[in-house]
Every structure is written in C-alpha cells, then in structure tokens.
C-alpha cells in the first residue's frame, strides 16, 4: 500500500514537472507574441506616418498642377 502511494506521488511529481515545463514554453511563446505585437504596432505607426507624408506631397503636386493649368490657359489666351 505504501509503495503504491509512493508510486502515485512520484507520478504526480513527474506530471507537475511536465506541466511546469509546458507553462514555461507557453510563457516564452507569449513573450514572443508581445514582442511581435510591439513590432507590428511600431510598423503600423511608421507606415501611417509615411502615407500621411505621401498624401501631403500629392496634395502639393495637385495644387501646383492646377496652378500650371491656369497659367497655361492664360498664356494661350494671350497668344
């Protein structure tokens, strides 16, 4: 009877070690997910800022093109 109890306790200790190992692996994976999330958030912010800068450049080009069209039309009238 005592041997059976000792065997059960040994099995339980082994199971607990296995569970702890799995928890450690899960924690490492979770840390990796946090790092990737931070990287993606930073990338998203940089991309958004880049798109906003491109949009400003497009707006400037649109205004310059519009002004050029008016100047060309005025030059044609003068001719």
Image: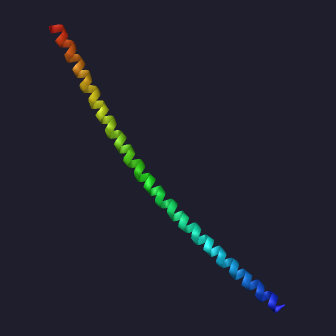
Q: Is residue 40 left or right of residue 13?
A: left
Q: Is residue 27 left or right of residue 72?
A: right
Residue sitting at x 27%, y 31%: 60
Residue nearest the observer in this picture, 62 or 21: 21
Residue sitting at x 77%, y 86%: 7
Quadrant showing the N terminus:
bottom right
x and y percent of residue 50 in the render? Answer: 34, 43
Q: Is residue 18 left or right of residue 41?
A: right
x and y percent of residue 12 in the render? Answer: 72, 80
How was the colour assigned to the protein in this rendering?
A: rainbow
> How many tags in the picture?
0
x and y percent of residue 42 in the render? Answer: 40, 53
Quadrant showing the C terminus:
top left
Does residue 15 sit above or below 41 in this rendering? below
Give the farthest residue toward the left.
Answer: 78
Does residue 59 sit above or below 47 in this rendering? above
Residue sitting at x 62%, y 75%: 20
| Residue 14 placement: quadrant | bottom right
| Residue 74 placement: quadrant | top left
Residue sitting at x 23%, y 22%: 67
Does residue 52 sit above or below 78 in this rendering? below
| Residue 64 placement: quadrant | top left
Give the farthest residue toward the right.
Answer: 1
x and y percent of residue 40 in the render? Answer: 45, 52
């Amino acid at each position: 009877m005592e041997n059976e109890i000792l065997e059960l306790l040994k099995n339980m200790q082994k199971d607990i070690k296995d569970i702890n190992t799995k928890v450690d692996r899960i924690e490492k994976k979770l840390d990796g997910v946090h790092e990737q999330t931070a990287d993606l958030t930073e990338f998203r912010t940089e991309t958004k800022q880049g798109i906003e800068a491109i949009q400003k450049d497009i707006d400037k080009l649109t205004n310059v093109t519009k002004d050029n069209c008016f100047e060309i039309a005025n030059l044609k009238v003068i001719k």
